[in-house]
Amino acid sequence: MTSLDRRSVLRTTTSAAAAGALAAGCAPGRTDRTVRDAAVPRPGARTPVHATRPPTRVPGRPVQLDHGPRDGRAVALTFHGRGDARLARALLGEAERAGARVTVLAVGDWLDERPEMARRILDGGHELGNHTMHHRNICALPQAAAYAEIAGCADRLRRLTGSIGSWFRPSQARRATDLVTRLARRAGYPHVLSYDLDSLDSTDPGAPAVRRTVLDGIGPGSVVSLHLGHAGTVAALPPILDGLRRRGLRAVTTTELMT
């Protein structure tokens, strides 16, 4: 092979590698650390504002919500936001390819580790909310500690997006106690978001089991509890969305479902 041929092959290989990296959602040569650092504004730098909605208020509905209207054709897929960011990005991509929008209730210490994920969620047209600062058993905490869990995550969301997020969901609890509900309202959330269908995906039962659990239990107005950071959930999402489409149901943000 001549020197000219070798240079041509090298250019072709390098271009293909770059294209593959871009198709996977990252720039060539960028590591996860690079992405994290890029999400932190440098002093004096101007960065785009990726604002999330303010807390959603649904007049006439209870403070604690676990489903939306049963006479429509919409459902809300809600994800506890924590875990491997690569799996989170893959899941968001699957939702977007199907034209679905989801709600992510992010844990504050995950946002500290992965601040770029707040932008990724919002840029995909999805919704972002508060799932406490450290994902402790909030209903078992003393008042001051419980409030710190809610307010700490709200502060992270405000710094990253300009808002405390659309919803608050208690950690390690399906429903909030009266105390936690009052503390959430004090922090600025008119409602506490529960759910009427648990996918049980956090136990890693495998994609077919997650798909069956969701499609067997879902109906108009359902709010489904799922989790980021689980490979089985990523694999289950396309058949779940296909099953919803076949039934005439569509996955929307929780605010769209409730209002």
Image (cartoon, helix red, strand yellow):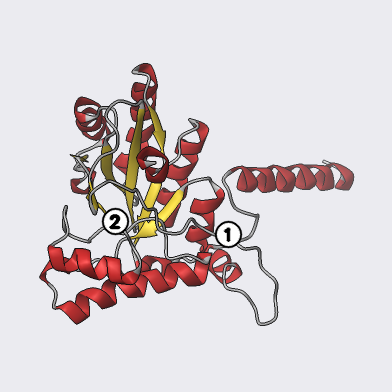
What amino acid does circle 1 point to?
His
Q: Residue at x 50, y 57 (%)?
A: 52
Residue 7 position, x and y percent, is 83, 48
Farthest residue toward the top? 246
What amino acid does circle 2 point to?
His
Residue 133 position, x and y percent, is 31, 70
Q: Above or below — where is 12 with respect to 214?
A: below
Label 2's element? loop
**Nearer to the camera, 179 or 25:** 179
State the residue position of label 1: 50
Q: Residue at x 37, y 53 (%)?
A: 57
Q: Above or below — where is 37 with respect to 106?
A: below
Quadrant of the image containing the N terminus: top right
* Left or right relative to 60: residue 42: right
* Left or right relative to 5: residue 255: left
Res 191 label = 2
**Nearer to the camera, 46 or 158:** 158
Label 1's element? loop
Residue 147 position, x and y percent, is 25, 75
**Nearer to the camera, 127 or 70:** 70
Quadrant of the image containing the C terminus: top left
Q: Above or below — where is 178 with respect to 205?
A: below
Can residue 113 be seen here? The reply is no
**Quadrant of residue 28 within the rendered picture:** bottom right
Front disc: 2 or 1: 2
* Left or right relative to 52: residue 30: right
Residue 185 position, x and y percent, is 28, 66
**Quadrant of residue 153 within the rendered picture:** bottom left
